[in-house]
C-alpha cells in the first residue's frame, strides 16, 4: 500500500514567489526552479534521509546569486519547494514506475533517461544515490503534489514569458542552476542532454566554473550565449558551452527563437560559492553574486534586434 497524506492547504507555503522590479525595463526573465527550501512534512515523514542529505540535491543559494535581477529591471521567479520533493525542471509526468505499486496512467513518461537515473519529476534518488522514499507512493498524492506545486510554477513562468514578449517584442529566459564540483554521472544531476553521457564530458578535475546550455544552438539566438560566454570569461571564470549540460525541460520547452522567446540555462559550479558538504555559503558568495550581476547587466544591454522574430524586426 502506498503512502497517503492529508494536507492543510492553508498552512502550506505558496509554490513560488516573484522578486519583481518596480517596473520591468528589459525583456529578461530569470527563473530558479531548484533553489526552494521548503521540505514538507509528508516528505520528511516518508524518508529515512536527513534534510541535509536531501538538500545536497538542490541549487542552494542560486536565487541569492541572481537576486540583483530586479535592480536591473528584470523579474526573478523563485521556487519555494525543495527539488527532492518535486523537480520543476522536468516534464510534468516524468514518473518512475518503481516508486508506485499501482499501474500508472498512459500519459506518464516512465521510460526517460531522467527516470532511469532516479531523477524524474518526483526524484527517487538523493544526490548521493540513496533512495529517498522507504515505501511506495500513491499516484493520487503525486497528482495532487503536481497540481499544487508544479503547474502553478509553470503557469506563472509561462505568463511572465508571455507578458514580457508582449511588452518588449521578445523574451529572454535565463534558467538559473548550480552543479556539483565533482564531474561524471552525479545522481544529483540529470539534465535532458548531457555530453557526458556519451563519454565526452569534462573530466572530474577539469569541470568548468560555468556551463552555458542552449540545446546546441536551438534554444536561443547565438548572440545571447556569446554575450554570456564573453562576460563570464572576462571575469576570469572557466566557461563551457553545452558540456556536460545542454539544458533541461525549461530550456527546450520555452526556448523558441523563431517565435521571439529565447532560453539559456546557466550552471554555476558550487565550489565557487558554497560548502557542498555542510550546505553553507562560503566566502565566494559575494564574488559570484557580483559576477551574475555583471552578466545581467551585459544581457540587458544587448540589442533587442537579436531577439525579435523576423516579422517583428521588419
Image (cartoon, grey):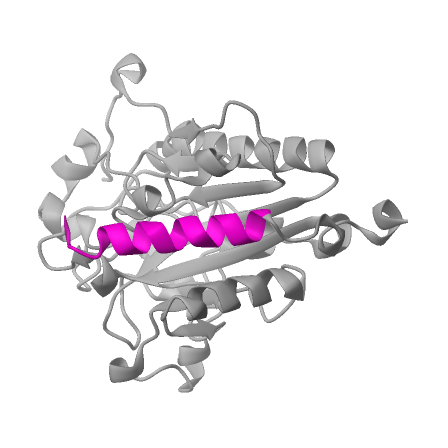
From the top left corner, tell me how far across and down residue 50 is, in percent. 8, 46
Which residue is found at the position 14% from the left and 52% from the top? 279
Of residues 190 and 264, the one nearer the viewer is 264
Q: Main secondary structure of the magenta part?
A: helix
Compared with residue 241, is residue 221 higher up or lower down, i.e. above or below?
A: above
Query: Over which residues does the magenta segment extend?
Result: 280-300
Q: Is residue 50 left or right of residue 86?
A: left
Residue at image location 21% in from the left, 36% down from the top: 39
Residue 277 located left or right of residue 194: left
Residue 90 in picture, x, y percent from top left = 45, 51
Is residue 178 visible in this depiction of the protein? yes
| Front-lying residue, 72 or 210 | 72
Quadrant of image for the N terminus: top left
Q: Locate residue 310, reporting x and y percent.
A: 85, 53
Q: Residue shown at 19%/48% (left/top)?
A: 55
User: Which residue is rendered at x = 51% and y = 22% of the image?
Assistant: 22
Identity of the residue furthest to the top in this view? 10
Q: Is residue 76 visible?
A: no
Q: Is residue 42 above or below residue 54?
A: above
Q: How many numbered marks appear?
A: 0
Instruction: Check residue 39 for magenta coloring.
Output: no
On whether residue 281 falls in the magenta region, the answer is yes
In the rendered image, residue 241, in percent from the top left (x then y), is placed at 49, 73
Amino acid at each position: 500500500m502506498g503512502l497517503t497524506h492529508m494536507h492543510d492547504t492553508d498552512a502550506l507555503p505558496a509554490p513560488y514567489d516573484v522578486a519583481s522590479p518596480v517596473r520591468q525595463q528589459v525583456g529578461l526573465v530569470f527563473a530558479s526552479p531548484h533553489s526552494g527550501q521548503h521540505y514538507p512534512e509528508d516528505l520528511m515523514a516518508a524518508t529515512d534521509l536527513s534534510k541535509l542529505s536531501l538538500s545536497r540535491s538542490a541549487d542552494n543559494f542560486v536565487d541569492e546569486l541572481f537576486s540583483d535581477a530586479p535592480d536591473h529591471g528584470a523579474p526573478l521567479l523563485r521556487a519555494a519547494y525543495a527539488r527532492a520533493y518535486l523537480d520543476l525542471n522536468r516534464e510534468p509526468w516524468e514518473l518512475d514506475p518503481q516508486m508506485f505499486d499501482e499501474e500508472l496512467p498512459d500519459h506518464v513518461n516512465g521510460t526517460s533517461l531522467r527516470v532511469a537515473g532516479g531523477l524524474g519529476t518526483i526524484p527517487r534518488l538523493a544526490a548521493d544515490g540513496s533512495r529517498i522514499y522507504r515505501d511506495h507512493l500513491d499516484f493520487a498524492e503525486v497528482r495532487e503534489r503536481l497540481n499544487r506545486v508544479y503547474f502553478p510554477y509553470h503557469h506563472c513562468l509561462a505568463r511572465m514569458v508571455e507578458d514580457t514578449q508582449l511588452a518588449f517584442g521578445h523574451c529572454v529566459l535565463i534558467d538559473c542552476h548550480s552543479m556539483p564540483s565533482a564531474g561524471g554521472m552525479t545522481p544529483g544531476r540529470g539534465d535532458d542532454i548531457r555530453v557526458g553521457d556519451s563519454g565526452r564530458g569534462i573530466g572530474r578535475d577539469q569541470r568548468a566554473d560555468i556551463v552555458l546550455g542552449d540545446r546546441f544552438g536551438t534554444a536561443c539566438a547565438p548572440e545571447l550565449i556569446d554575450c554570456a560566454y564573453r562576460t563570464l570569461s572576462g571575469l576570469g571564470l572557466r566557461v563551457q558551452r553545452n558540456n556536460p549540460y545542454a539544458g533541461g525541460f525549461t530550456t527546450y520547452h520555452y526556448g523558441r527563437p523563431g517565435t521571439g522567446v529565447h532560453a539559456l540555462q546557466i550552471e554555476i559550479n558550487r565550489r565557487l560559492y558554497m560548502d557542498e558538504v555542510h550546505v553553507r555559503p562560503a566566502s565566494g558568495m559575494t564574488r559570484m553574486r557580483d559576477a551574475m550581476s555583471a552578466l545581467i547587466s551585459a544581457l540587458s544591454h544587448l540589442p533587442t534586434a537579436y531577439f525579435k522574430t523576423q516579422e517583428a524586426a521588419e
